[in-house]
């Protein structure tokens, strides 16, 4: 099986949407993965409380509350929570599948959003960012929707809200900007666009 990469151009040549491979909301206590491993999925790890270490290849990355890391498919990594400490985190692993009728595709979102296109074109094996616009809220809602066992337009929308958010924070970081308001305007615009797509999918009975 080929590695699943967020940056594979095939996802924008057709109409594909994200779907979950695994997800959790968990506290780790003095935990250390015994070896590096990799997934056939893209992984996002978000630290809710305390801190942890994520090894990616030969690099050791220290994450604390409000930090998150996106690791591309096929990239070796492992989680370490030091002895006598704990780390609470949100985690989701996702892949792509053909878009369901009435949902939103990655191609559609990239056509709309310049920053998302730039982020996808960059193609980094992993990125580490600080949450400055409340990614936690979107990620929590997404995991709760998955817990309900639903595969709805709402799930598709939340994935793209997540990706647009990450692209905005990535751009703000690369531009050396730390103002929350500057990025928040764009995320709000993206949410409005996604909502307009959702509204156009429904037929209302008067």
Image (spheres, rainbow, N blue to C red):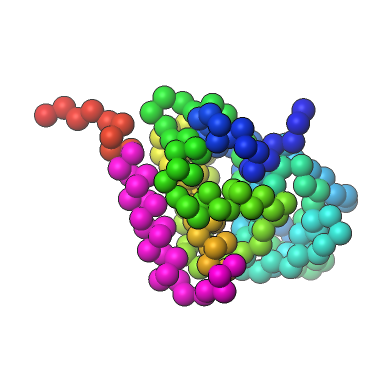
In the displayed structure, would residue 158 be above or below residue 50? above
The image position of residue 166, as x and y in percent, is: 54, 56
The image position of residue 154, as x and y in percent, is: 41, 39
User: Is residue 185 in the magenta section?
Assistant: yes
Q: Is residue 8 visible?
A: yes
Chain part drawn in magenta: 174-197
Q: Is residue 71 visible?
A: no
Residue occupying image coordinates x 65% and y 38%: 8
User: Is residue 193 in the magenta section?
Assistant: yes
The image position of residue 74, as x and y in percent, is: 76, 42
Please state if 40 lies on the left or on the right of 173 as rendered. Answer: right
| Count of numbered tags | 0
**Quarter of the image that includes the N terminus:** top right
Q: Residue furthest left?
A: 206
Foreground: 95 or 114?
114
Question: Main SS of the magenta segment?
Answer: helix
In the displayed structure, would residue 60 be above or below residue 113? below
Residue occupying image coordinates x 19% and y 30%: 204
């Amino acid at each position: 099986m080929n590695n699943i990469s967020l940056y594979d151009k095939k996802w924008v040549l057709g109409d594909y949407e994200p779907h979950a491979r695994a997800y959790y909301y968990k506290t780790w206590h003095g935990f250390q993965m015994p070896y590096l491993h990799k997934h056939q999925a893209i992984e996002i790890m978000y630290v809710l409380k305390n801190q942890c270490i994520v090894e990616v290849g030969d690099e050791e990355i220290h994450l604390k509350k409000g930090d998150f890391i996106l690791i591309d498919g096929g990239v070796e990594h492992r989680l370490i929570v030091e002895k006598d400490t704990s780390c609470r985190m949100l985690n989701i692993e996702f892949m792509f599948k053909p878009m369901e009728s009435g949902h939103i595709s990655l191609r559609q979102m990239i056509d709309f959003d310049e920053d998302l296109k730039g982020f996808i074109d960059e193609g980094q094996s992993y990125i580490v960012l600080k949450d400055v616009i409340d990614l936690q809220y979107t990620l929590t809602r997404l995991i709760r929707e998955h817990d309900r066992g639903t595969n709805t337009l709402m799930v598709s929308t939340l994935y793209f809200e997540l990706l647009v958010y990450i692209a905005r924070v990535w751009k703000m970081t690369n531009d050396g900007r730390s103002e929350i308001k500057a990025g928040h305007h764009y995320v709000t615009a993206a949410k409005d666009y996604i909502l307009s797509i959702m509204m156009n999918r429904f037929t209302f009975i008067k």
